[in-house]
Image: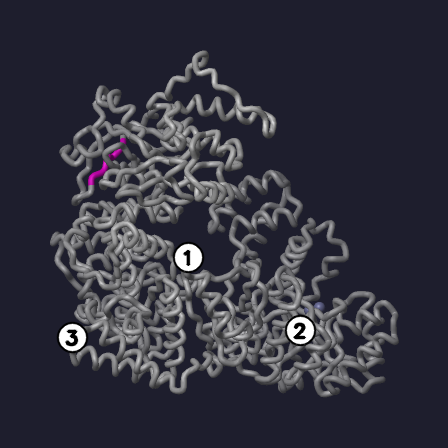
Amino acid sequence: MAGYVELHAHSHFSFLDGASSPQELIRRAADLSMPALALTDHDGLYGMVRFIMEAREVGIQPIVGAELTTDGGGHLTLLVQDASGFSNLSRLISRAQLDHSKGEASLSWEQLEAHHQGLIALSGCRNGEISQAILRQDWPAALEAGRRYAALLGRERFFLEIQRHLVGSDRRLEQRLIELAEHLGLGIVATNDVHYAAPDGRPLQDVLTGIKHNLPIHELASLRRPNAEFYLKSPDEMQELFAGLPEAIRNTAAIAERCQFNLDLSAHRLPKFPVESARATLRELSFEGVRARYPQLTPRVVDQLEHELAVIGKMGLEDYFLIVWDICNYARRKGFPAKGRGSSANSLVAYCLEITQVDPIRHNLLFERFLSEERGGMPDIDVDFSREGREKVIQYVYDRYGEEHTAMVCNVVTYRSRSAVRDVGKALGFPAAAVDRIAKSLTRWDLEGAAGALKKEGDGLPWEHFAGLVRQIEGFPRHLSIHVGGMVITGAPLVEQTPIERASMPGRVVTQWDKDDVEDAGLIKIDLLSLRTLDVLAETVRLVQEHEGIELDLSAIGLDDPAIYNLMTEADTIGLFQVESRAQMQMLPKMKPTTFEDVMIEVAIVRPGPILGKMIHPYLQRRQGLEPVTYVHPALAPVLDDTMGVILFQEQVLGVAQAIGGFTPGEGDLLRRAMTRKRSYEEIEKMRARFVQGALNQGLSQAIAEDTFDKIAAFGGYGFCKSHAAAFARTTYETGYMKLYHAAAFYTAFMNHQPLGFYSPEVIVEDAKRHGVPVLGVDVNRSGARCTVEAGCMRLGFNYVKELGPVALERMEAARAEGLFQSLEDFCARVDLPREGLENLVMVGAFDGFGTPRRELLWRFREIQRQPEGGMRLAYPDEQLCFPELSDWDRTAQDYQILGLTAGQHLTTHFREEWIALGVVPSRDLRAQPDGKRVRVAGLVITRQAPETAKGHVFITLEDEFGTVNTILRPGVFLRYKPVATQSSLLILEGRVVHDGGAVNVLVERVRAGREEVTEALSHDFH
Ligand SMILES: [Zn+2]
Ligand SMILES: [Zn+2]
C-alpha cells in the first residue's frame, strides 16, 4: 500500500468535537483515493458500525480506533489490528467509561497494561501525554512516558504522532518529538487530527465548540481550533506537507496494512443457555407446550412444529428461544404478564413456549415471515411486560447473565430543528429573545420551517448563515439515551463486543451502538418492552378474583363472543386497547368487526402507513361492497387476498415487492430493514428503480409501477406486520372482555394506571357510570390510596385528590389501619397532612360520612390549626354559627377542580334545562337526527385534535351526561372561532348532522362558549 492513510479522524460521534458524519468521512476518503481510513472518536466506538458499513459499500478499508482520554487528562490514539485488539479496545473503553462518572471517561495505565494485545498506539494530538510534557518543557517526563509506552508496546506498536497544522508551536513540538523518537528508537507517524471532511466544515466545527463550552464563538479564544487545517487532506497534500519526513508518511500506510480487522460479532452473539442440550430441551418444552395449547393435536400442527424446530436448529437459535422462554417464564412465575408482539407471533414454537399468545395456525400466520434460512438475517423477539414487571425482568436478566454480558441498547438522541436553532443561535451570539421565539414556533421535525423562519428575520444579522448551520447540524448526535426495551445479552463478555457506558438512569448501562448498529454488527437484541394495558389487565384479574371469586385465565378465553364484537361495532370502545381513539371510533361502525381477523385489520388500518398510502378508503369501499376487489396484476392476488387487494400489513409490502418487483428474498429483507429503521423513507426510495424495472418486466405500465411503489414508500415503516396486529388485537379483545363482563374491576384498574390511552380519567369515570358501575366519592374511612372495588362499585382513591402526595397516602392508610376515624378532630390528631391536602379532602366530601356540612368542617379545621400544639379544644358554638350545605353546582365544581372529575352528577346536568330551552340535542338523541339536519349540540370538551393528515380540520369531541358527540370544524370555521374553540371547556356548537357509514358527526358552522364560569372552574386538564 502506497501513499498516505489518515489514522486520526473524528466524526460527529466525538460529540460536539467533529463536524462530519462517519459516512461523510469515508466518502471523502474515497473521493481522495485514500485506500483506508481510521475513525478515532473520543472515548468511544459510537459511529464505528456506520463507518464500517459505508466503507464496505465504497470499497475502502476501515480502521477501527479511538482516541482515549488517559488518567491525567492526556489523549492516546489506539488502532485495532485484529479481533483480540478489538476485544481489548472495547474493554478498555468500557472500563474507562464505567469506572468514572458519566461523561468523565478515563483510561488507567493498569488497564492498558492488562489489555493492549492487538492494538497499535499513537502518541496522540497536542493533548497527548508526551506532547503535553514537551509543551510544558518537562523533558524528563516526556522521556519517561516515551520509555513506558515503548516498554509496554514495543517499537512495532508504538509511534510518535506528528501533526502539522501550521501553528507556531507545532515546529518546536515536532522537533522534540523527533528527537525523542531517535533517542528511543521509535517510529514517527503523520496524522492530521481530522475534525471535518472538507475545509468548509470549519464554521460548523467552531459552532460545535461554542455549544460544547456554552460560549458564543467570539469568546472561545484558545478553546477554538486556530485555523481551518483540520480537514481530511489528500495523500498528495499530506505528502507535500511532510516532504521532509517521508518516513512519517510511509508509516501510515504500513500501519494501515497491519490493521485488517473485519467486524462480525455473530459468533459471540448469544450465551449458552445452561442446559446439557439446548436442542433437546427446546424440543421437550415445545412438545409439552403444544399438548397444552392443542388438546386435539392434528398432524398439521405437529408437522409445523417439527418444521420450525428444524429451521431453528439449522440456524443455531435454540439458545435464543430458551433465553426468551426463561425470561417470560420468570415474569409469569412472579405474577406479571408477558406477551410477545411483532413478528415472533408468526411462530408456533414461540406460541407453545408461551412467549406469544396468538395461535399462528388459527390465524394463518406464516413462520417464514419470522425466520427464514433463505432470507437470512436475525429474528427479532419483542415481548411486552407490564410496567411493574418489566423492571423486575430487566433486573433478573442482569442477575442471571452478569453485568459483563448484558446491557440495554442505546438510542442516539440527535439534533432536531428546535434544539438546533437554540444551540446554534446561542453559539453565534444571536439575540436570545429572537432565537427563543423562532425555536418555539417550530415543530420538532420542521427543518425547512426553521430555515424559512430564520431567513425571514433579516434585520442585519447573518440569518442565512445561521439557517445554513442549522441545516447542517440536523441529525447530529447530542447524547445517548436508553432505547425503550432493547437488551443485548452475549456469550463472550459484552464489554469485549461493544463498548458500554453508564446510562443516565442510575445503575443501568447502555451499549455505544443503537439498535440498528447492534443488528449490523451481528449481535441479537431482545426487546423487553412495557405496556401499561398489561398492568390494567393484571390488576383486573386480581380484583375479579378478590371481589367476584373468579379465577380468570385470559389466555384461555375464546375469541368468538359476538357481544365483544358488537361493543366495537357500536364504537363503545373507551378503555379498549388500540381502538378507542376518535379515528378508530369513526372507523369501527364502518368496519363492523365480527371476527378476530377483522380486529387485526382494525388495529392495523388506523396507522400512518395505511393512511399515507391512501389504503383506508379503498378498503372500506370494498368491504362494504361499494367497489369491486381488483388487483393491478394477477400475481398480487395471493399476497393481498386477505385484505381485499389493499396493502394493510407490512409483510404485504414485501410480498408485493417480490410478486411484481421481482425482488429476491434477500432484497426483500433489505426492504424490511429499511422499513423498520429511522429515515426509512430515503432508504426505501433507493430501491425504486429496481422495483419499477421489475414491474415493467412483468408487463405493468410505468405509471402503475410508479404508483405501486409510491404506496410502498408511503407505507414505509409506519405499518404493523400481521402477526403484530394479531398480538395487539388479542389484547384489544381481552380489554373488551373485561369491560363487558367485569366492568367494576376493569374501570377501577384502568383508573389506577393513568395516564393511559386516549382519554382523561374524567372520561373513564363517566364511561364507567354509563356502563352500570356506580362511582363512589372519596371517603376517609373507605377509600384507599388507589381506587378500589366496593360492592360492585368503583370507590375513588386518595390518589385523585390534588395536593396530597404519596407520603400523605401512606400516612392515611397507616393511621386507618389502627382504627376508623371518628371525626375530623380525630383524623387531624392522627394524620399530619399539608393544609391544602386536608382542605381538598373536606371539599370533595371525604368527611361527609360524619354528617357535618363541608363548610363547617372547613371552619373547624381552621380552628384546629389556630390552636397551639396540645392546646385546649374549642367548644363548638353550634348555635351562633350556621353553615349552609354547598349547593349541587358548588359540589360539582369543587369535584372538577380538586379531582378533575366527579363521582356525582355530570357537570352538564346543571345546564340541561337551559340547553333544552336552546334546543340542544343531547348526545344520545343525535343518531336519530336525519342526515343534513341543522342541530345544536353542547357539552364538556374532552378532546381537541388537529392531525397533520387532516389538513387544517379540527376534531372536537364533546361529552354530556349521556355520552359523547363527535364534531368536525373545517379550517375556515376553526379559524373564525379559534379563541373560543380552543379555550372554552364547555361549548355549544351548531351545525349539520352527517351520517357516514354508521358514524355520526356534526359538521360545525358556529361555535359559542358554554359558561365562562365552567372554563374558569375547570383545571388545565380540560384545555
Ligand atoms: Zn486529541
Ligand atoms: Zn484527536
The image position of residue 229, as x and y in percent, is 70, 66
Rendered image quadrant of residue 40: bottom right
Tell me if residue 905 is in the magenta stretch: no
Q: Is 849 left, or right, of 55 in this rendering?
A: left
**Where the C terminus falls, by quadrant?**
top left
Q: Give the residue type at disc 2.
A: His
Q: Earlier in the sequence, mark 2 or mark 1?
A: 2
Q: Give the residue type at disc 3.
A: Gln
The reply to whether residue 984 is visible in this rendering is no
Secondary structure under badge 1?
helix
Look at 40% across and 77% down and name the residue there.
320
CB of mark 3 near ligand 2 (< 8 Å): no
Prevalent SS, magenta region: strand
Instruction: Determine crowd level at label 3: few under 14, some 14-19, many 20+ residues with C-alpha closer than 10 A.
Output: few
Which residues fall within the magenta stretch?
A: 1000-1004
Look at mark 3 in the image and give the residue it sits on: 296
Look at mark 2 in the image and give the residue it sits on: 8
Q: Quadrant of ligand 1?
A: bottom right
Task: Decide which of 550, 1012 is in the foreground and name it.
Answer: 550
The image position of residue 392, as x and y in percent, is 45, 63
Disc 2 or disc 1, which is closer to the eye? Answer: 1
Instruction: Determine crowd level at label 2: few under 14, some 14-19, many 20+ residues with C-alpha closer than 10 A.
Output: many
**Where the N terminus falls, by quadrant?**
bottom right
Look at 46% across and 36% down and name the residue there.
802
The image position of residue 867, as x and y in percent, is 58, 25
Tell me if residue 1003 is in the magenta stretch: yes
Look at mark 1 in the image and give the residue it sits on: 387
Q: Earlier in the sequence, mark 2 or mark 3?
A: 2
The image position of residue 144, as x and y in percent, is 83, 78
Cβ atoms at labels 3 and 1 below 8 Å apart = no
